[in-house]
Image: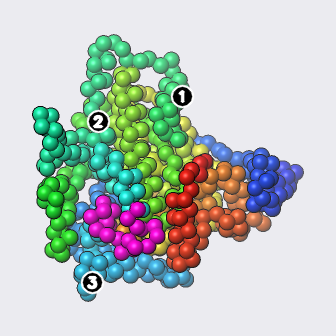
Amino acid sequence: MGEINRRNFLKASMLGAAAAAVASASAVKGMVSPLVADAADIVAPVTETSEFPYKVDAKYQRYNSLKNFFEKTLDPEANKTPIKFHYDDVSKITGKKDTGKDLPTLNAERLGIKGRPATLAETGVLFYSQHIGAMLTQRHNETGWTGLDEALNAGAWAIDFDYSGFNAAGGGPGSVITPYPINPMTNEIANEPVMVPGLYNWDNIDVESVRQQGQQWKFKSKEEASKMVKKAACFLGADLAGIAPYDERWTYSTWGRKIPKPCKMPNGRTKLLPWDLPKMLSGGGVEVFGHAKFEPDWEKYAGFKPKSVIVFVIEEDYEAIRTSPSVISSATVGKIYSNIAEVAYKIAVFLRKLGYYAAACGNDTGISVPMAVQAGLGEAGRNGLLITQKFGPRHRIAKVYTDLELAPDKPRKFGVREFCRLCKKCADACPAQAISHEKDPKVLQPEDCEVAENPYTEKWHLDSNRCGSFWAYNGSPCSNCVAVCSWNKVETWNHDVARIATRIPLLQDAARKFDEWFGYNGPVNPDERLESGYVQNMVKDFWNNPESIKQ
């Protein structure tokens, strides 16, 4: 932070105090917002840096995509021993009840297993089977998990499941989908699926045609190209877009694709699935089929070597997220995963028609958060998610690699890490206690990590086995760490108040409390969110409100 004189410090302090005093009065918010922004810009100005803002040790090695929780659960080796948490009991660290330590045993009981915790594969398959609607959740009679809520969830995820190859789980390269062909002579739909590329396809055949005709579009400069590409990205559906240089550190060291095998369903259709669903549903146990593995070779699979990455985010619905951990909060996640596939595909086609190669990617091929940080879209928070200034963590990320040379944006800092050091709200709200309570991030060493984490980068520890175990127990993804986040707001003046609070010593202890004073985001304690009726009331509000709350 740059030096500020005493007069400016006092001015900022008074403005911040005034803002805090009247912020809950809706009639004066319009007057308060400029004062808050003025104070925030003095005390905690938004800064840019030319370098990646977090430490990366010289020992760092690229991440193996098959180590992430969702991919690892489909590895047969992960079905041999019970799931293991990095810390067996985090109450020794937090001094609070460990609400996650018994989840593996509870999940095993759901599968009819007695006397031992669930394996990682059993945990994943239990989650997947509920997530695709093949198995009822244990809360299916409760508000937020009913058939109505599940139907909305299915519709929201439909594009990601049916046209993107469930790219949300990671993997790659590209996506493979399994539609059922129609006989054009009889109009009959087949019972056997075929495998074809999905929306995240890397088909660059049009690029060669454009180039052969001498029609490749020439921009006046890299800066002009970046401006127009970002405009196109937002026009085509992105809410925020930035440009990152291609940085091989973030490309996965191993690409992989789930191996699907035919499963005969009761309706007579064959489904291609990476686990034996009929066997599991009949009580025969869990069987997973593993992965096909690929070397990360852009030129072999996409026909080019990337020079730039267009990184973009799409906002998740505020009303839906605050119902977490209900199925409604999963629905907005699925809706955005479905939307980003469409937008990434459109951006890729736009670039190809200009005569440039493009590879549209969601969670596959590379780590999205550091790329988004490089693209100036936000900072990495305690919860491991990208925190943007406008939406906080309430969004999803996708990227499009290209051989078009673009002027990159610069990483930006606007107070997230300073706030995360003080807040810890996401860690307290996590039902599985998967998020670190340590005050400061650090360059993680191998002994600090569980299997899905990559050491030698500066961040807070996250235990995906704990997180995934709650998802399996809940029958649906959880977004508590997004819902309670102080940056998850629909009015950005609140973010400015947060920035001020982290920099004024007298207000630091109250930084986290602003949300609770103003009634945002509901109870932090995960049990209280449900037992108080807050989640159920938010679900009712969601269904009864005809118009969504917009940023």
Residue at which label 3 appears: 116
User: Which one is earlier in the sequence, the residue at label 2 or at label 1?
Assistant: 2
Q: Give the residue furthest to the front.
A: 186
Magenta region: 127-148
Residue under the point 16% across and 69% down: 279
Vertical position of residue 281 compared to residue 97: above or below: above
Examine the rendering and report whether any part of residue 3 can be seen: no
Element type where label 2 sits in the image = loop
Vertical position of residue 548 compared to residue 301: above or below: below
Q: Nearer the viewer, residue 252 or 185?
A: 185
Label 3 CA crowd tier, 10 Å (few <14, some 14–19, many 20+): some
Vertical position of residue 419 compared to residue 102: above or below: above
Q: CA distance from mark 1 to mark 3?
A: 56 Å
Residue 126: image location, x then y, percent: 29, 69
Residue under the point 16% across and 59% down: 267
Vertical position of residue 186 compared to residue 277: above or below: above
The disc placed on residue 511 is none
Label 1 CA crowd tier, 10 Å (few <14, some 14–19, many 20+): some
The disc placed on residue 202 is 2
Residue 473: image location, x then y, percent: 37, 73
Residue at which label 1 appears: 227
Q: Nearer the viewer, residue 78 or 209?
A: 209
Residue 531: image location, x then y, percent: 53, 78
User: Which one is earlier in the sequence, the residue at label 1 or at label 3?
Assistant: 3
Q: Looking at the picture, which amino acid does disc 2 mark?
A: Trp
Task: Report the side of 276 relative to 333 (left or right).
Answer: left
